[in-house]
Amino acid sequence: MLAEIARFQQWLRRRSPHASTPVHYANDVELFFNCCDKAVAEVTATDIDAFIEQCQAQGHATATVNRRLAALRTFYRFLDLTTVDAPRNPVLPQRHYIRQGRRLPRDVEDEALEALFAVIQSPRDKAMFSLMLRCGLRVGEVRSLNMNDLYLQPASGQLPRLWLHGKGGNERVAYLSPQALAVLQNWLAVRPVAGGCAAVFLNRFGRRLTVTGIQYLLAGYCREAGVWVTCHQFRHTFARHLVEAGVPVTTIQRLLGHVRLRTTEVYLHISDTQTQADYQAAMAVLAQRLAGGG
């Protein structure tokens, strides 16, 4: 790793100590310089063009390419802030960023969820994935959950809750449904006493699970159940269930921890009950007209 990239990663970590951005951005910048094989000050906009073409030829998604470009642009902005005679930023948004249409979040059908949870027997794993599905937790939030973040016996009139440390260092409260509370308590009843480790979910060595480890566990259960589900799809499905239950979008925003309401509104397109009702009524009218020879 170049010395500049190491300093860049330290700078990002100081600004966002709880985020995964420092690791991902440093990896993206290092990947670029491994491909480009030029000094930092010698990189031009043409080199960025070539890098984009290489990423696309390798089949990388548009979002992945744009994230790598954002990492590179932030890297050169860091150099401009911290060094004398910093090189010009070669990443030009209007030239390099790739336009992508709005993509709807992919949720999971309820039948696939039933098949998946039918094969999960571990109290720990069932609790982890239930928190994602019933409380909308991200995989990183499950991984970071500590014992002192649990409020399972609240005052009268209050719901059991979790204190979460979300993206960008933002904190939020997640409420526990009776089902989520039950599976969490089942795990806590058999959770080993880990010396000095405050994590709620532990691996077999008594240490905090990694994000990769949780994703690996889910992939194994998916193979056994014959379905495919990602950790983030649990969160999408949680949002769909809330929409179908008629929960106001502003409440869904708070439960998901979205900063912008526009981010939450995209879930309304997954299960738009009004549009479905209008379409169904229109098809009934058309079917009646056609049946009558109209």
Image (cartoon, rainbow, N blue to C red):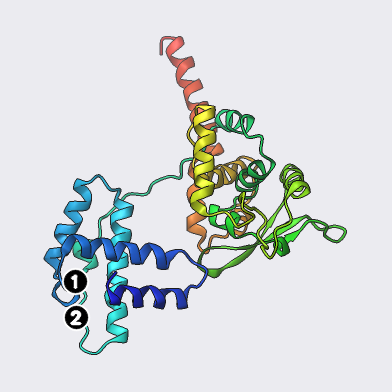
Determine the secondary structure under disc 2. Answer: loop
Residue at position x 22%, y 65% from top? 33
Q: In which quarter of the image is residue 130?
A: top right
Tell me the residue that label 2 is attached to. 87
In this image, 256 relative to 16: left or right? right
In this image, 193 relative to 109: left or right? right
Could you tell me which quadrant the N terminus lies in? bottom left
Q: Which mark is residue 90?
A: 1
| Local crowd size for mark 2, using a 10 Å CA cut-off: few (<14), some (14–19), many (≥20) | some
Eyeballing the image, is 287 above or below 213? above
Q: Nearer the viewer, residue 190 or 284?
A: 190
| Local crowd size for mark 1, using a 10 Å CA cut-off: few (<14), some (14–19), many (≥20) | many
Q: Can residue 69 be seen in this view?
A: no
Number of labels in the image equals 2
In this image, 68 relative to 247: left or right? left
Q: Where is residue 105 in the image (x, y as percent from the top left)?
A: 46, 45
Q: Which of 207 and 162 is in front in this view?
A: 207
- Taking the view exactly as shown, the residue that stands out farthest to the right is 156
Q: Where is residue 260 in the image (x, y as percent from the top left)?
A: 50, 62
Residue at position x 47%, y 23% from top? 283
Q: In which quarter of the image is residue 67?
A: bottom left
Residue at position x 30%, y 58% from top? 66
Determine the secondary structure under disc 1. Answer: loop
Q: Where is residue 285 in the image (x, y as percent from the top left)?
A: 49, 21
Residue at position x 13%, y 70% from top? 44
| Dots 2, 1 in contact, CB < 8 A | yes
Q: Which of 80 and 42 is in front in this view?
A: 42
In this image, 18 relative to 90: left or right? right
Could you tell me which quadrant the C terminus lies in? top left
Eyeballing the image, is 189 above or below 122? below
